[in-house]
């Protein structure tokens, strides 16, 4: 294993970062692990790649050295492996992706990655669409419980639908879908699921930066690369043949060619009265081949068995994967290193494992799981939630970490979305003992609750949160924190520029790690069972197994 050394600048920062209270974590180890995992040698840590092999080997090596025990798949001799196999299908476009749109009697050619970003189809080994009619379906929402139906009986078979991203009340901030806070109906994953249910050839999500919460570069890099999914008996029940995104200007042009106004239709789509509109004289065509293969990726799982209640487990999770090697940026860099997203969270996971292993044995078992394929749709955590290694009923809670630490000391901390459960209350209580306060998700419109690895656990009822570092920085306050977040989203998120920076302030890693350690200690050495609050959509699923928790 190649050894990595922190720069002199970082070493000095680490040496001067001692806090008043003893630190539970070794911030130097966190920085080193982050640097290693996000180095070019790991090739962006794509699932089913040489980068995965190096990553998994490194994680196992570090967990062994920490004194954890293997807690993955059961072996034939009854022992546990360090990994859980996660069978996936990997689809990639093979050769050119031909796209054309006919409007107003004129056929225009679009370039993959520029005007449009089409995902490799999960249906067959070639997708050919010839002059399919195009329909605008507003936000593409069917929500009977809200008495909302954007489809109004429209038959979408044989048609391509244009759909807005986010919820109907994103623009106004008020309405039946939580105002600015995104519901699952606003997620692009929901839009594609609805396309399959409707029997459409496919949906094209119209990209706008504000409601999507990220720019076109993120869309391009995330969708023109390899596409992964868990292996399904019938992929067509979960996927339409065509799944993709289209630039706003191209959507506006298609509507205009049919005599329709984009902004006026968007306003109509924010009401129950909206009806889908077919774009007269507009058709869509595409043709490309697909290379689809079955692959097996790995969740890496280590544990520290509990002394009194080993059958009760607290999980720390972080996704080890990133986007691998992809389209070059303006500098020609093709490696998507994923330093903040999520080498930092994975490094924190390893260090928390070391911290627990060094201390007194916890009463409950503590599991440290680095999951795969988060960037491909939370697939590693989804697979675990559907094929758990340990009973979900006695899983105390899940603490997920995705991008933590580098902004420096913060007065606050946050979570992805506002989780209606007592586990978040426990986090807030521990934070107060660290003189830090809880800030609600600063961007609820981004739908972060549905975008991190805690979500598949939540769907099956397990109390789960995803921790986020603060934005009210000791140096610079909220303005500095917001500026850092905005710059990262615009210039680094899902881009090759997300690289390790030796000038990161390690005090943030130290503070976040110590808070997370204390939360885990509180759960591991108590009889607390976190619960979903009344009205939470996941409470009923958890309540089914209440008798199994003592």
Image (cartoon, rainbow, N blue to C red):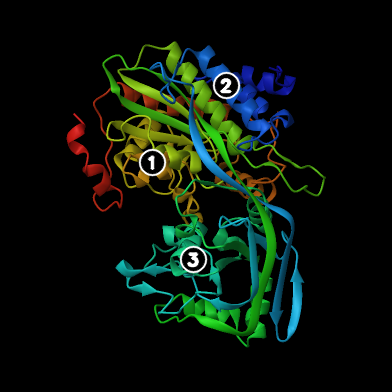
Is 73 left or right of 113, judged from the image as shown? left
Quarter of the image with the N terminus in it: top right
For residue 404, say whether it is visible.
no
Local crowd at mark 1 within 10 Å, few (<14), some, or many (≥20)?
Answer: few
Is 248 left or right of 142, judged from the image as shown? right
- Which one is nearer the viewer's eye here, 279 or 468? 279
Q: Position of residue 120 (x, y in %)?
A: 63, 55
Residue that appears at 75% across and 83% down: 106
Q: Quarter-wise, where is residue 27 in the image?
A: top right
Task: Please report contact status of discs 1 and 2: CB closer than 8 Å, yes or no.
Answer: no
Q: Quarter-wise, where is residue 46 in the image?
A: top right
Label 3 and label 1: CA atoms lie apart by 23 Å
Which comes sooner in the sequence, label 2 or label 3?
A: 2
Circle 2 residue: 27
Circle 1 residue: 386
For residue 331, say whether it is visible.
yes
Q: Position of residue 62 (x, y in %)?
A: 56, 18
């Amino acid at each position: 294993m190649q050894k990595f050394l922190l720069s002199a600048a970082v070493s000095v920062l680490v040496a001067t970062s001692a806090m008043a209270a003893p630190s539970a974590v070794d911030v130097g180890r966190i920085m080193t692990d982050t640097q290693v995992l996000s180095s070019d040698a790991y090739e962006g840590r794509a699932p089913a790649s040489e980068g995965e092999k190096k990553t998994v080997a490194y994680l196992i090596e570090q967990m062994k050295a920490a004194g954890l025990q293997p807690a993955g798949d059961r072996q034939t001799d009854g022992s546990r492996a360090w990994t859980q196999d996660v069978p996936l299908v990997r689809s990639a476009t093979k050769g050119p992706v031909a796209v054309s749109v006919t409007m107003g009697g004129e056929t225009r050619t679009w370039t993959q990655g520029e005007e449009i970003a089409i995902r490799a189809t999960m249906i067959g080994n070639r997708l050919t669409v010839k002059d399919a009619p195009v329909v605008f379906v507003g936000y593409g929402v069917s929500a009977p419980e809200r008495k909302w139906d954007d489809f109004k009986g429209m038959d979408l078979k044989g048609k391509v639908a244009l759909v807005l991203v986010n919820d109907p009340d994103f623009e106004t901030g008020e309405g039946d879908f939580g105002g600015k806070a995104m519901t699952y109906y606003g997620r692009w994953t929901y839009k594609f699921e609805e396309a399959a249910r409707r029997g459409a050839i496919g949906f094209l999500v119209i990209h706008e930066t504000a409601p999507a919460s990220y720019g076109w570069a993120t869309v391009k890099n995330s969708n023109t690369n390899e596409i992964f999914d868990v292996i399904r008996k019938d992929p067509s029940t979960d996927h339409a043949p065509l799944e993709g995104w289209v630039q706003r200007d191209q959507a506006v042009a298609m509507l205009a060619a049919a005599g329709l106004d984009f902004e006026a239709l968007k306003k109509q789509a924010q009401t129950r009265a909206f009806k889908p509109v077919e774009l007269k004289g507009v058709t869509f065509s595409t043709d490309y081949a697909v290379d689809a293969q079955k692959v097996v990726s790995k969740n890496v799982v280590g544990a520290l068995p509990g002394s009194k209640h080993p059958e009760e487990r607290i999980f720390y999770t972080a996704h080890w994967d990133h986007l691998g090697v992809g389209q070059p940026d303006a500098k020609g860099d093709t490696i998507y290193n994923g330093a903040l997203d999520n080498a930092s969270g994975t490094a924190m996971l390893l260090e928390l494992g070391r911290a627990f292993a060094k201390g007194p044995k916890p009463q409950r078992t503590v599991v440290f799981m680095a999951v795969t394929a988060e960037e491909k749709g939370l697939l590693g955590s989804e697979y675990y939630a559907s094929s758990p290694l340990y009973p979900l009923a006695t899983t105390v809670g899940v603490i997920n970490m995705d991008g933590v630490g580098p902004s420096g000391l913060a007065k606050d901390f946050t979570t992805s979305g506002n989780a209606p459960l007592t586990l978040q209350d426990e986090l807030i209580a521990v934070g107060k003992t660290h003189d830090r306060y809880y800030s609600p998700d600063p961007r609820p419109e981004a739908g972060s609750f549905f975008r991190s690895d805690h979500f598949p656990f939540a769907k099956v009822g397990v109390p789960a949160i995803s921790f986020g570092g603060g934005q009210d920085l000791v140096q610079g306050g909220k303005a500095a924190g917001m500026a850092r977040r905005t710059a990262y989203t615009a210039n680094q998120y899902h881009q090759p520029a997300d690289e390790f920076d030796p000038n990161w302030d390690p005090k943030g890693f130290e503070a976040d790690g110590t808070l997370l350690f204390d939360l885990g200690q509180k759960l591991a050495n108590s009889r607390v069972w976190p619960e979903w609050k009344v009205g939470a959509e996941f409470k009923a699923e958890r309540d089914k197994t209440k008798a199994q928790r003592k």
